[in-house]
Image (cartoon, rainbow, N blue to C red):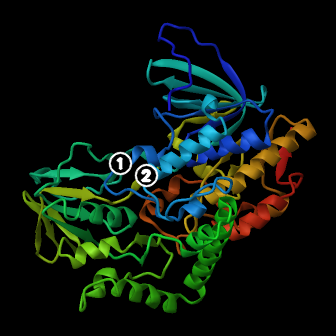
Amino acid sequence: MADTAPLQTSKTRAKTEHFDVLVVGAGISGVGAGYHLKTQNPKKKFVILEAYETFGGTWHMHRYPGIRSDSDLYTFGYRYKPWVGPPIASREEILKYMDEVIAENDLAPHIRYRHKITSASWSSAKKRWTVRAERLDTGEMLTFTAKFLWMCQGYYKHAEGYTPEWPGMDAFHGQIVHPQTWPEDLDLTGKKVVVIGSGATAATVVPAIAGKCEHVTLLQRSPTYFIPARNENVLADELRMLGVDEKWIHEIVRRKYLFEQAEFTRRSFEDSELLRNELLEGVKACLPEGYDMKHFTPSYRPWQQRVAFVPDADLFEGIKAGLASVVTDHIERFTQNGILLKSGRELEADVIVTATGFNLSVLGGIPFEVDGRPVNWAETITYRGMMFTGVPNLVWVFGYFRASWTLRVDIMGDFVARLLKHMDARGARQVEVALRPQDHNMEILPWIDEDNFNPGYLARSMAQMPKRGANPEWAHTQNYWKEKDELPLVDLDAPEFRYS
């Protein structure tokens, strides 16, 4: 997709452009935000600023072998755009889907690519945000003003992934690669590869390169839960065979997935031991007889971390074929030829892939100010995980861990559209959330309950994140099935909303 912004040289003096809404990011959230503004607030003038040269965000940037969704596309896709492919989709299929959404809804004229935001400042006197951005293709500094900011930039640093500092890394004679910055010219032919990690990324890379390299070893500190299943939806296929309209198929299958996800989540809390056994039996059935299940038996209960779907059991097929193996151990240090483990065993490697997660980025790492004072997000309290005390006219899309990210994009799209209309009806130019008298003695808690969900990237960065409160309005429930019913009924004139 071509850049829609007019070409300017660094010598050109750019005038300040003003918009009703400025959306940050043209990934799955930003494109969704654009759709909701276009359809629900058609009179609002909006722009989407994206640092990359095209749309997609994560799906544009991540290019490691086999990259695919770890959520089904019936719920990861938008509610208004039927998904017609297999439930688990490749990067290319997702980008094609997003491209169709942009084209079908004429969103391209609203997107400015290669615009990296360098600061955002709110003025209560002027009732607007001033956003400064660098035009990456020309080096020009641009200024935008907006009545409202919709932050859709994601939640981790795109420039580099998280790789722990192990002793001896400099001594390793081979190549160390993080999936987030996978080299396009990396040739694994005839190479011994060790992939460090146990999550969805590792489970994607290993089967994708098994057979292309001499051998690949998945090295994990602790196992994760997997769900192996065919990458198909029998119900969708049967409905298509009966000639049912794709919009109906999308809605029916979407509801079925959501029901099953809700039941899975409920059981992870209320019936965790039986669910755990079912998950382990499902994996055991895909492995060679007598395989040591310690490599696929996590120490935590289901859903304390994401459960990875393995389409067509491809990870386990590589193990059965002898192309891949799994080692569960701790790293002592790197050596010239590979990795020395705490057990004393050395894994030889030509290439080491660190599928060890990413670094959290709070609101894109953009410096924010409100009336000249820098914003420290850790000192704010979140309203339902999307607005923040002391920061007017701003929402942040932070999706779900136990359900598809895009589900929250859609219900937040409805909420923001309704809030903008409500502000217009009241003649208000500013809205912010503030604690009520009954909130001042409530318990202040971390962004998310680590006892219920504790991935490494959150644990490492919790101190940077906004806080939540014990009262319902200030909770960040991460519960789609509650929010889908509660958000449409939020009283926008409730005392936690302050208009001016």
Q: Label 1, on which residue?
A: 63
The picture places residue 306, in percent across and down from the top left corner, at 47, 70
The picture places residue 151, in percent across and down from the top left corner, at 62, 43
Q: Amino acid at mark 2?
A: Arg
Badge 2 crowding class, 10 Å Cα cut-off, few under 14, some 14 to 19, many 20 or more, is many
Q: Residue at x 26, y 43 (%)?
A: 184
- Up-down: is 460 above or below 53? below
Residue lying farthest to the front in this orientation: 242
Q: Label 2, on which residue?
A: 91
What numbered label is drawn on residue 121?
A: none
The picture places residue 362, in percent across and down from the top left corner, at 53, 48
- Up-down: is 177 above or below 18? below
Q: How far apart in space, not on screen, are marks 2 and 1 (Cα)?
A: 8 Å
Name the side, left or right, on which 485 lies relative to 8: right
Name the side, left or right, on which 444 lies relative to 41: left
Residue 445 lies in quadrant: bottom right
**Does residue 392 appear in the picture of this structure?**
no
Q: Quadrant of the C terminus?
A: top right
Closest to the observer: 344 or 247? Answer: 247
Closest to the observer: 223 or 323? Answer: 323
Q: Amino acid at mark 1?
A: Arg
Is there a contact, CB below 8 Å, between mark 2 and mark 1? yes
The picture places residue 285, in percent across and down from the top left corner, at 35, 87
Circle 1: element type? loop
Badge 1 crowding class, 10 Å Cα cut-off, few under 14, some 14 to 19, many 20 or more, is some
Residue 190 lies in quadrant: bottom left
Circle 2: element type? helix
Q: Nearer the viewer, mark 2 or mark 1?
A: 2
